[in-house]
Amino acid sequence: MKIGIVTHGIPNLFSEGTTKEAIILIEELKKRNISTKLFIQNYTKIFASSSSKDKLFKSIKNYEYKIIQEKNTSLLQKIIKNCSRLFSRNPDNFFTDHITRKKIESLIYKYNPDLIINMLNIPCSSNYGLKYIPTYNYINMPPHEVEKLRFEIYKKDFRFQNFFLMLNSLIYYKNIHKTYKKVFKNTRIGFLASPDSFNYYKKILKGKKLITLKNFTKNQNQKYFPYTKKKKVIIMVGNLKATFTKEGLYDLSENIMPYLLKLRKKINFKLYIIGKFDPPTSVKYLLKYDWIKFTGWVQDINKYYKIANCILVTNPTPLGTRIRILNCMQAGVPVVTYKSNVLNNKEFIYNKNILFANDPKSIVNELEKVLLNNKLGKRLSLAGYKTIKKHYNYKKIANFMIDTILKDYKSINN
């Protein structure tokens, strides 16, 4: 048996985003003697906090793979392309340019897999030869919601160029619904990583099987640090160019900071913001304090996990439980976040294994608790670690997904 796995960006185990699942699936499929091949679209687009290509290529050196370079396009070309989408209902144009799509098609068709697993919906329309190969999609937040948020971010940090970026986002957002339903025409089962989007995808998939999965949480060099007396340190983590990390930084600088400044007068804590790239200019200006440090990319994040009283996750947009939350729980770092980040996960219980709030003032109150109460920190640390161990075992999650796919594939043959 052969399976083709399609990704956007090189899969690895050190990123923040949804690029590690492909490697976990391949490793578990290998144990079943099932052959796989990765079809990687556009390696210049890297969903990772480190942009080292050498490190990325090392992560896939033991696997069979093919990289398809997406054609470079200017912002003007993107706008024109998105405008053309307004008059087209062809799902083949949804993610890639025509040439890139053809390359992916022919390479997958040449490999002739028994089935395809698409990570992030690429390629997955039904208007070409691959429609006869059973397809299974790993999906998350709908792209029109991401684009809506991206539009707001461009507006906040406005520059002349951002006008065109906003225009591009607006056009994309307006026409995306027309083709998005057709993107899943060939999908047999959708595996949903963001449970908050369940009702939306239920309509999109039109009666096809939709299964909500726990996120995959395997990381390189991950360690657990038993909670000891800390030096009053808060961390935030994320690729500072990523849409949702920017959302969190804007919420911190605009909404949380007034309350955080009051807390700083009472408690002498430090805030480390960890991640590659520079933050937006307006954010950097509003966070210009000697107790706030942008660390840039760090080679070993464990040294920050070890000293942190907690991680602060400030994204108000519901998107399931973020990987950075699960990573920190796995390392024994208490989590303070908005309730919207754990809405559909019953295993997260307030004051037992996590602290959450509904507004900026309340979220700072939760920070104060964990900074001052060492017993609370110890309880949250151990309970969070046990929660990950029990509910987020990556091997169990991956094998559940594989078993479900193989059972469905067998039913086709029968």
Image (spheres, rainbow, N blue to C red):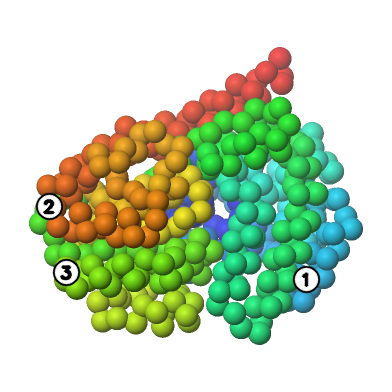
Q: Secondary structure at mark 3?
A: helix
**Residue 196 location (% of width, % of height):** 54, 41
Disc 1 or disc 2, which is closer to the eye?
A: 2
Quickly name the residue at label 1: 79
Quickly name the residue at label 3: 266
Residue at 45%, 57% in the rendered image: 315
Say above or below: 371 vs 30.
Answer: below
- Which badge, 2 or 3, comes first in the chain's sequence? 3
Front position in the image: 347 or 183 = 347
Residue at 56%, 74% in the rendered image: 156
Q: Quadrant of residue 216?
A: top left
Q: Are marks 1 and 3 in contact (CB under 8 Å)?
A: no
Q: Residues within 10 Å of mark 3 (few under 14, many from 20)?
A: few
Residue at 60%, 72% in the rendered image: 154
The N terminus - image quarter: top right
Kindly identify the amino acid type of the residue bearing the numbered disc 3. Lys
Q: Is residue 96 left or right of residue 405?
A: right
The Cα atoms of the two marked residues, 1 and 3, are separated by 50 Å
